Image (cartoon, rainbow, N blue to C red):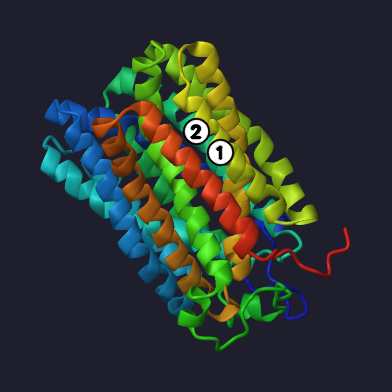
Amino acid sequence: MQDFPPQKRAPGVLSREGLPIVGTFLIWGTGSGAQTLARPLFAYALTDSVFPVTLLISVLALSRMVSGPLTGYLADHWGRKPMAVTGAAIRGTASGLVFFTDSFPAFFALEFIGAIGVAMWQTTSQVIVADMSTPENRGRAVATRNTTLRFGQIVGPLMGGVVAGMFGLQAVFLINSVSKFVVMIVTWRMVKETRPGSETAKAEQPKRGSHEPEPGVSMWSIIASRPFVALAVTTIAIAFMNQGVFMTLFPIAAKEEAGLDTAQIGTLVAIASAITLIISFPNGVIVDKYGRKASLVPGLILAGGAGILLALLVDFRTAFQAAAVFGIAQSMTQGANQTYAMDLAPEDRRGAFLGMWTSIQSFGAFVGPLAVGAAVEFWSFSTAFYGVAVLMTTAGLAMAILGPETKARSDKG
């Protein structure tokens, strides 16, 4: 592919030239959604025990926590495309080899290696979105990424269920494998290199955000700043709510506390996902027009409300209310938090900064399930949910007090 003429800037996510990278989000999400369905079921089939399944999920987050910062550093030095392509290839290869696996240790090892590939692609894809957006349209760019990913994650399990019924559970991993190699090819052939200093990115650098650090400022100074502290607190809290509560505890609590069956629980999870999908892009418009905190702070408080509703589960109606409020809160917090992180990332070390932020996300995803699980083990479901509600509210207050608004001041719209 030829570079753009020097007078033109690198393509934006929301432009026609940005369609290839948006397409990779959809393809990636579809394959990952299928594997998300198959992973716990296959692990349980190999061990006939629940604990190894929870251990596997936590260790995968630990793998991403370690590999995220290194990926970001290398993306700054070697370029975005090589890291994205390598990550997709690693995940695709690991998933494909699962088809020939019949032991839990081998499956565990392949998933650990595959998680490294996931961290490489997730980190790099977020850096690419930051490179290809400006403070004025970044909220919509992030919403586009999240919407296409989530749509794929809804389609993927449906496709995986059909394939598992026809060809067996291990065949589902081939869906993910193929999807990752398609992402690899599309990225290599059709996505432009966006690293500052590359020929495509040299043409015209995006306008600096009002709180983006100046080039040359030490990374330690950035980490020790109030905006980064606020970002870290909200990122960990969101991971606790998403991975620790809704993805881990909610299905179990809905069964044990509200007496729901598997079909009802699946319906509620689908409803929450659909609400998040529908609201994500309109919320991206709000983030660009009114500011990141205008969505992030109320969303965190609303997530605290979802925690309280979860603590009061007694039947399908109360579970539906909790799932709906969670879906709205997730759409308000996830994209706004990602946009806030991209705004703070210094242009000359954007990969390193977002890699470190990815590590913080993974830390929350690693600790969250273990912490809420321990709370249930020693106390009760309601205690765990009330605790997370306090955490979300505290994060909202921390962002409101410590976090400056990063929306471009020059945007009059």
Numbered circle sitting on residue 307: 2
Badge 1 vs badge 2, beta-carbon distance below 8 Å: yes
Residue 68: x and y in percent read 38, 63
Residue 347 in view, yes or no: yes
Question: Which is nearer the eye, 408 or 93?
Answer: 408
Numbered circle sitting on residue 88: none
| Residue occupying the point 12% across, 43% down | 105
Give the Cα distance between marks 1 and 2.
Answer: 6 Å
SS of the residue under disc 2: helix
| Residue occupying the point 38% across, 14% down | 262
* Amino acid type, residue under disc 1 in the picture: Ala
Q: Residue furthest bottom?
A: 216
- Name the residue that disc number 1 marks: 303
Question: Which is nearer the eye, 348 or 411?
Answer: 411
* Amino acid type, residue under disc 2 in the picture: Gly
52 with respect to 304 (left or right): left
Q: From the viewer's perspective, is residue 343 above or below residue 394?
A: below
Question: Which is nearer the eye, 355 or 192?
Answer: 355
Residue 113: x and y in percent read 25, 54
Q: From the viewer's perspective, is residue 317 above or below residue 179?
A: above
Q: From the viewer's perspective, is residue 340 above or below residue 53?
A: below
Name the quarter where the N terminus is drawn: bottom right
SS of the residue under disc 1: helix
403 with respect to 72 (left or right): right
State the image quarter where residue 209 is shown: bottom right
| Residue occupying the point 18% across, 49% down | 109
Residue 345: x and y in percent read 57, 71
State the image quarter where residue 104 is shown: top left
